[in-house]
Image (cartoon, helix red, strand yellow):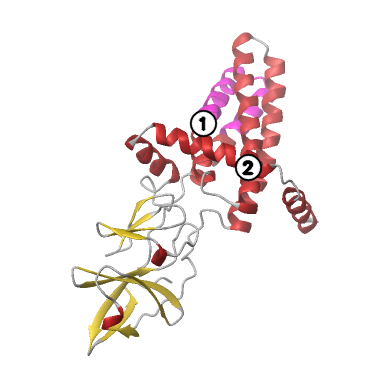
Amino acid sequence: MAVRVQSAVDRFIRSQGWMDGVAEAVQGLVGRAYEALGPNGKTLRNALHGTTVLGHPLHPAVTDLPIGAWMVGFVADGTGQDRAADTAHLLTFGALTVSALSGYTDFHETYGHERRVALTHGLTMTTAYGLEAASLLLRAAGARGTAKMLSAAGLGLIAAGGYLGGDLVYGIGTMVNRNAFLEAPEDFVDVGASGDFPEGALRRVQANGAAVLVVRQDGRLNAIGAVCSHAGGPLDEGTLEGGCVTCPWHGSVFRIDDGTVVNGPATFSQPPFEARERDGRVEVKVAVPLH
């Protein structure tokens, strides 16, 4: 039964071609909003992705709070505890605001079918957000009965939206670390001749099947995972500046000496590798075991 439901939802979303135009418009609004903030926009974006706050995606970390508060408000509404209900719903609204901001920030870098699912998820959650906002206004106006109905309807939408959010992460892999299952050599392996790595060149090599980016800067060899942790972009096709490589797909920035993420949308750093030269050959191994 669960498989049939998932397949039906997937087929329906894939058939909705109109979603692409709407998604592009929403992504454009998000991008322009951050651009309008100037340097502060990059700081806020990194915080809402989770790059500088957790080193882990922020959105899934903050979604439990509004759901929990909403459930408390629902039960308090049903048992006539008006003050507790109002407090819970006010907390719900505040937590939903943070969740929505982080969600739309992550949405900005989605594409294809992933973007359609993310749009459906976002619009469902935004509708629930609007119902909760209307419920709060009606509570203040004394129309508690209608307010309760609206918040209950919103809670139902949250459950549906949560299903789609789970599909984004566990089915499609949105914001999942692309290096989570990387098998990297723990002993040095040969990846080429020293002359294959000229100063400032981004070179992608295979180390026992692991894609590694090797960069010589100021005469020193640096090596990190070559697959961007955010969405799998090829870092060897990116740009090198100031000791950092920028992913060509979504602009995530990583230090080449240790793989640390500097700017999002990536939240996970690149796996660092040790690189050495022996008898005119270059060898690499993973700096820290990944599993």
Location of residue 26 by image quarter: top right
| Front-lying residue, 128 or 39 | 39
Residue ID at (35%, 34%): 38
The x and y percentages for residue 56 are 43, 51
Image quarter where the N terminus lies is bottom right
Label 1 neighbour load within 10 Å: few <14, some 14-19, many 20+: some
Q: Is residue 72 magenta?
A: yes
Residue 242 at least partly seen: yes
Residue ID at (64%, 14%): 138
In the depicted structure, whether residue 194 falls above or below residue 181:
below
Label 2 neighbour load within 10 Å: few <14, some 14-19, many 20+: many
Residue tagged by mark 2? 119
Query: Magenta residues?
Result: 69-96
The x and y percentages for residue 198 are 26, 75
* Label 2, label 1: how far apart the Cα atoms are: 17 Å
Instruction: Kindly identify the amino acid type of the residue bearing the numbered disc 1.
Output: Thr
Query: Regarding mark 2 in the picture, which secondary structure is present there?
Result: helix
The x and y percentages for residue 206 are 42, 79
| Front-lying residue, 206 or 103 | 206
**Residue with the most extreme top position:** 141
Residue tagged by mark 1? 97
Asked if the residue at tag 1 contacts the one at tag 2, i.e. Cβ–Cβ closer than 8 Å, the answer is: no
Q: Earlier in the sequence, mark 2 or mark 1?
A: 1
